[in-house]
Amino acid sequence: MTKADTRQKILDSAEVLFAEHGFGEVSVRQVVQAAEVNVASIHYYFGSKEALIEEVLSRRLAPLNEERLRQLTEYEVAAEKEGGALSLEDVLYALIGPAIRLSRENDGGEYFIRLMGRLFAEPSESVQTMLKSRFKELFLRFNCALTATLPKVKKRDLFWRMHFVLGAMSLTLCDRHRPAVWSDGVCDPEDLEEVIAQLVTFCAAGMRADACKKRRKR
Amino acid sequence: MTKADTRQKILDSAEVLFAEHGFGEVSVRQVVQAAEVNVASIHYYFGSKEALIEEVLSRRLAPLNEERLRQLTEYEVAAEKEGGALSLEDVLYALIGPAIRLSRENDGGEYFIRLMGRLFAEPSESVQTMLKSRFKELFLRFNCALTATLPKVKKRDLFWRMHFVLGAMSLTLCDRHRPAVWSDGVCDPEDLEEVIAQLVTFCAAGMRADACKKRRKR
DNA sequence: GTCTATAGAACGATAGAC
DNA sequence: GTCTATCGTTCTATAGAC
């Protein structure tokens, strides 16, 4: 077995196990058993359990966020060529589409995406700092694009709404079966393009809402 | 120290630790140390770590969901008295308001709410079955109320949108500081009524969106 | 009802032969 | 690069004195 094979097998098994049970619940011994490699391999290749976690994440996050930025740029160029403006739906589509598609792929992307959903629900400082640094560029680019398509929405409202978009997307990524289970089969999460369309429709309407007003007591 | 005191101290400490670090990452020894009680207490009072987790959850979930249902009924009665119909904003307010308020209380409710946010991101079957059974009644009641206020929205679209509302709310509950951190202080998550108003505004607009259409390729 | 003491298993990590 | 063997630690859980 080549070096690349062992490394790969460890990463693949770790991705699945961490996604299904969480970091703390999975031991390195379970990982090596699932990967069918030796106990010592993880420390040989990664040094520690923590370093393994880091690797599992970075392996897929960079390509995903690059694809999002690529699509956003593509839509911007297309809009300019047609002489029109970038639409809100385009921006949301570039943000949401690649992640949902990755979550339905059979090469393990599904597990990585569930892992990301978990991480966003994780308030520990180290995790949040890691997320912020890895999403900073993406966040700024999309924030600009959204501001441009929604000139009437106040800056503060826009930040809140981006947070809510992230939440709606994040829960959808966490567990693809939930909408079907809770709706007794009315929703079909296997229909990829519908999931994306549903999310984009909901989020676009939410982003376009009139200025938020605190509620009068009734 | 009375029996009730010890039990209470264990539950309070467990709530905080589980919320901050997750179930798997926290050992019963850390819990007893934080609670300043004996190592054997947890097994005396709860039997096992798993049973302790169950107790931490049920202690607060029932009152929270009762309050949500109570508010919904209150709004229904008020609307009928005025001869008007229940508004979508009322329904969302009854769903979201109590949870956000609990998340800002200083009696530990804050930690419980973060724990719930984590659980929703947890796809393990046992957790999802537990959640579904404990939220079934609430879900049905609110589903009815939403259907009534949104007669034009298709059943399937409605289910999807409820899922997205849950996601937006869930992420907001997970980590109260995130919107402030990501927006460099522009958002103020300490302003309770604004958080609620922002969420209700966004979700109401999303729920009212026109029928979802799959996207044409561009 | 609270304590000490400890069983018995699993943990992350490493040393050293091959 | 892969293996076995094992270190030292920590874990959940329990038995039994008080």
Image (cartoon, coloured by chain):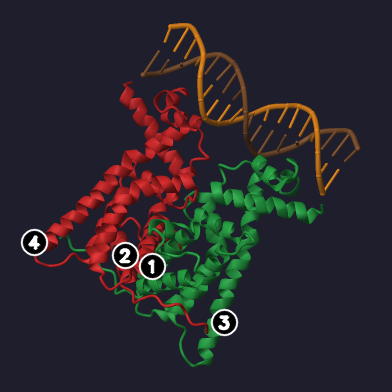
Chain colours: A green, B red, C brown, D orange
For residue B198, the mark is 2
**Viewer-side label of 1, 3:** 3
For residue B81, the mark is 4
Q: Which residue is mark 1?
A: A161
For residue A74, the mark is 3
Q: Residues within 10 Å of mark 2 (few under 14, many from 20)?
A: many
Q: Secondary structure at mark 4?
A: helix
Q: Are marks 1 and 4 in contact (CB under 8 Å)?
A: no
Q: Is residue B147 above or below residue B213?
A: above
Pointer 4 chain? B
Mark 3 and mark 4 on one chain: no
**Viewer-side label of 3, 4:** 4
Q: Secondary structure at mark 3?
A: helix
In space, the residues marked 1 and 4 are separated at their CA atoms by: 34 Å
Instruction: Check the picture and name the quadrant holding the C terminus of chain A.
Output: bottom left
Quarter where residue B83 is shown = bottom left
Quick check: can you spot residue B151? yes
Q: Residue at x 42, y 47 (%)?
A: B129
**Viewer-side label of 3, 2:** 3
Q: Is residue A38 above or below residue D8?
A: below
Mark 2 and mark 4 on one chain: yes
Quarter where residue B200 is shown = bottom left
Q: Nearer the viewer, residue B184 or C10?
A: C10
Q: Are marks 1 and 2 in contact (CB under 8 Å)?
A: yes
